[in-house]
């Protein structure tokens, strides 16, 4: 199920928002640490939320 998110400007940075249902599903809280893994050849960015057993993968094609 592809999802489209808009890149927005926050201060001097750009950010992607996370849908509220994913915040609930992954139990993401403000202040959580996130490990970012960038795979340029596959145009894929993986975010691993520290302390959570699941991971959220954001890529050119949304994958569950």
Image (cartoon, rainbow, N blue to C red):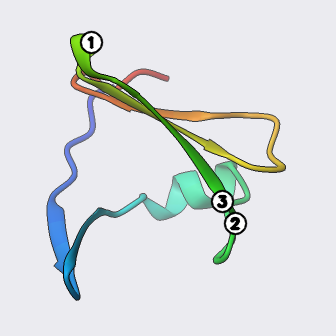
Q: Tell me which corner region of the image, top left, top right, bottom left or bottom right, holds residue 13.
A: bottom left
Q: Are there few (<14), some (14-19), or many (20+) residues within 10 Å of tag 1?
A: few
**Residue that label 2 marks:** 32
Picture disc at residue 24: 3
Q: Residue at label 1? A: 42
Q: Of residues 1 and 51, which is closer to you in this image?
A: 51
Q: Are marks 3 and 2 in contact (CB under 8 Å)?
A: no
Badge 2 or badge 1: first in the primary sequence:
2
Circle on res. 31: none
At mark 3, the secondary structure is: helix
Question: Can you give x and y, in whole percent of width and height, for residue 35 in the image?
Answer: 60, 45
Mark 2: give few (<14), some (14-19) or many (20+) Cα within 10 Å. Answer: few
In the displayed structure, would residue 3 be above or below residue 64?
Answer: below
Q: Is label 1 or label 3 in front?
A: 1
Check the image and report above or below for 61 versus 35.
above
The Cα atoms of the two marked residues, 1 and 3, are separated by 28 Å
**Quarter occupied by residue 63:** top left
Secondary structure under tag 2 reads loop
Percent x, y of residue 12: 19, 82
Residue at x-position 22% and y-position 52%:
5
């Amino acid at each position: 199920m592809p999802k489209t998110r808009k890149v927005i400007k926050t201060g001097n940075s750009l950010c992607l928002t996370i849908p509220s249902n994913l915040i609930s599903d992954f139990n993401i809280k403000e202040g959580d640490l996130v490990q970012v893994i960038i795979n340029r050849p596959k145009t894929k960015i993986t975010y691993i939320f520290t302390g959570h057993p699941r991971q959220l993968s954001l890529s050119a094609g949304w994958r569950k």
